[in-house]
Amino acid sequence: MFDAQTAELLRSAPAVPGFDPELLPAFLTYQYANLASYRLGGLESPSDGQGDEWTLERLADTYELTAVLQIEPQMARASSFVAATAQQIIARREQTHPDATALPNIDQHRLDPALSAVLLFLLSEQFADANEATAAINLNTDVQTYEATILTEHIIDLGKGSLHDILKRSERWRVPRDFQDLEERALAALFENLATGIELFAAEFLKLPAPDTVLGRYDDRRQAFERVIALSAARHDVSGPLESIDFIFAGPHHLASLLLSATDGISAASLLEVPPPTGADEKTWRDWLRFRSEKFPYMWSNHRQAVEREFHQTGVSGVVVLPTGAGKTTVSSLKIAGALARGKKVVFLAPTHALVEQLTEDLQEMFPKDLLGSVVSSDFDLLLQEDATFQDIEVMTPERCLAMLSFASEAFQDVALLVFDECHLLSPESGKIRRALDAMLCVLGFNNVASDADILFLSAMVKNGDELAVWLAELTGRPSVSVDLIWKPSRQARGVVIYDSKELESARANAIAAQEAEDARLEKTAKTLRKKAQEQLTAHPYAIWGLQHNWISEDNLYCSTTPLLSNSVFLAGKLEYGPSVRLTPNANGVAASIAAAGAAKGLKTIIFVNTKNDAVTVAGNVTELLNETVEPTDYEALRWNALELELGELKHSLLSGPAVAVPHNSAMLRLERDLAERMFKRSNGAKVIVATPTLAQGLNLPAHLAILAGDKRAGIEGGRESLEAHEILNAAARAGRAGHLANGLVLLVPEPNMHFIQKNQVSKATQQKLKAVLPEDDHCVTISDPLQIVLDRVNVGQATDPQVAYTINRFANLPSEDASTATDQLFDLKKSFAAHIARNKDNIETFNQKVAVFRAAV
């Protein structure tokens, strides 16, 4: 569930008697997996039921106290993350059994764990978790004081990063009111001082003046919090027989300690601290940072590391490899803002039209026209016009960019930056190299016509980022940096569907018996399974969960097996000689059953299927299982009307109307895809979306649960072929998404069925299967040069090969090699990645010979 860096943070927490912190990643993942199985209906209780001395509650309380008492920052950060994660799991358990008795979030003696979790996540710099944790906070205005409600709202905004809202609230919330007694007045005064400290922090962090309502009361937020700590637990000498009185306000005291630690922990994480790149207009840069800080004031640790390596500097190209969901687009926005602040333009490449559409919307939000005067466009048709010019940011596929380079290269003259998202597209995949060829030719051509421009590659999956960065330095003739960071702001519990071998044997036996009985009754031997026999192919699904990072690489799997559903699911089977039955996964049917169970418990779910038809069919099956209706919004109703006008009747649409489960595939009209995405995004809309791998390619539709219906597909030459590692990772990454859902669940329905003889023990065959279908980390693609494949094929006489013919045609209309200047050659093979690799292997002479043969063919 935790990446290697986050797992190491957990393990670095201080040891406590009777509990080894080395076990913390596995322990917390185990608790989360149990909670997941409970929500799906497989377990009767979400608690672990182990009866260990260290319960989740005790662990949370112990490490929360440790966090606020620790002096050493790293120890405090680790302790706070342990405590916050434990508190979050506890809060989710309680949400499954809501308590009818509402309690104040903060009073004299108590601080609600939901408030603690937000501040503990902030202390550990887990901003995505803090944002998500705010959803568990109830205002409870009826059972707590006015000041407690204001303080709760402040902490919610602190967790969300809505610091401007805190300052706005500061201007209006302080009003005179009556108190019943001195104790209530004292508590209100402590709460008001805590609110003052939060308001001072917001102003400091945003580099704004302190609000007039608190101006001059304290030097800074630390002084305010320390004042509450001193007053809320103090002994005061008095005259008379008592001699002294103890003032104890445990709730405010603990909250002040947490606020002091949390604001100390994030004080260096301000987006406004990022320096402008060389040549950027400083006012434009600062205005944009201030605009972004209104919603996203906190910089994640990986983004700060990227800035420290100066990837955003003018004249620096780079390769940024961050795990899926770690903010690649956000970090690239710093580089884009630098180019715009210099009055230059940007080309942003994305691999699919769906992702182009999404990125266009995202970049329009990041760079609004009314702020910088910048226009973000993805309207390729406009670029086909005579004398076409680029907008400030043009978003397109590599193929469209290559077309522009070929017929309108002058349009690139003011472009200062090329951003290539999902750049692992550069690598040929399973022998299908056409898209990789276009992408690589696009990069070479762009560098030729815009030689002063920087190039930024983005990916979650590239293994050889360092090598690519060196090549970019050679290609551009300027510095290039590699930023490869494994930390993830979100995390997933990953499981594989597995069955009890006894149940599978029983299903086979029952099916054979039913088959033979039907054959005897009808006095005819069927060649395929009869319906009565198929009805016997049922079993209860379990999940085997990995409890530590890279769990599949260990000699002994550290895992947990839990039941997923209370009901059995239908498997499929084929009748074979004997007679016997070979069980098959019925992956789509099993995925639909699990998705329906999850959706019924409020889990937004994505199912990935292999074909466009499957997406439509499975969505219909889930809709039938859930038997719920979805009401369209007014805007959606207009879109439905437009769709009906376009098609004549909605029955002709792949999306025939609002539904609780919707399909999503590349065969759908843009209007259909837009409706499906909008319905899924809203909380009261579609609960399940069933998609082909198109959706996995970077689209930002996060879900609580991602189900991969199978790890194989029909092969081009018949039979079944395994999905590529990056395809599985792309699909799995839709579960949980920083800024939306910090935690998610991934379930894979494998082919063939997997089984266990004893829970938590996995056979060698199963272990090998797990290694094949669950990559150890996101780094699963080594980029090579597709041009090298073409050169090799030409040199062995494969002139009629489709990819060779395509590439030769691309080069045929270009100037010959003896052109007067090097810039006349749009695609300079001597600057290619293949040439770089050849030089490093001291094999450049052979490479040049192959280029000569290719030129002759051209």
Image (cartoon, grey):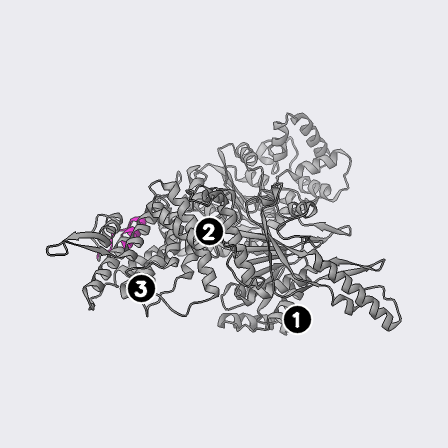
Query: Relative to residue 717, is residue 790 depicted above or below?
Result: above
Instruction: Report the residue marked by disc 3.
Output: 149
The Cα atoms of the two marked residues, 2 and 1, are separated by 61 Å
The answer to whether residue 1 shows anywhere in this view is yes
Question: Circle 3 sits in a helix, a strand or a loop, which is it?
Answer: helix
- Amino acid beneath label 1: His
Magenta span of residues: 198-212
The residue lying toward the viewer, choosing from 240 and 260, is 240
Where residue 420 appears, as percent x and y from the top left, is 54, 45
Where residue 405 appears, as percent x and y from the top left, is 58, 44
Of labels 1 and 3, the one closer to you:
3
The residue lying toward the viewer, choosing from 554 and 428, is 554
Question: Circle 1 sits in a helix, a strand or a loop, which is it?
Answer: helix
Circle 3 residues within 10 Å: few <14, some 14–19, many ≥20: many
Instruction: Report the residue marked by disc 1.
Output: 652
Of labels 2 and 1, the one closer to you:
2
- At 61% across and 39% down in the image, what residue appears? 783
Marked residue nearer the N-terminal end (1 or 3): 3
Instruction: Report the residue marked by disc 2.
Output: 53
**Tags 1 and 3 touching, CB below 8 Å:** no
Q: Residue furthest left?
A: 239
- Indicate the quadrant containing the C terminus: top left, top right, bottom left or bottom right: top right
The Cα atoms of the two marked residues, 1 and 3, are separated by 52 Å
Where residue 300 appears, as percent x and y from the top left, is 43, 46
**Tags 2 and 1 touching, CB below 8 Å:** no
- At 49% across and 44% down in the image, what residue appears? 7
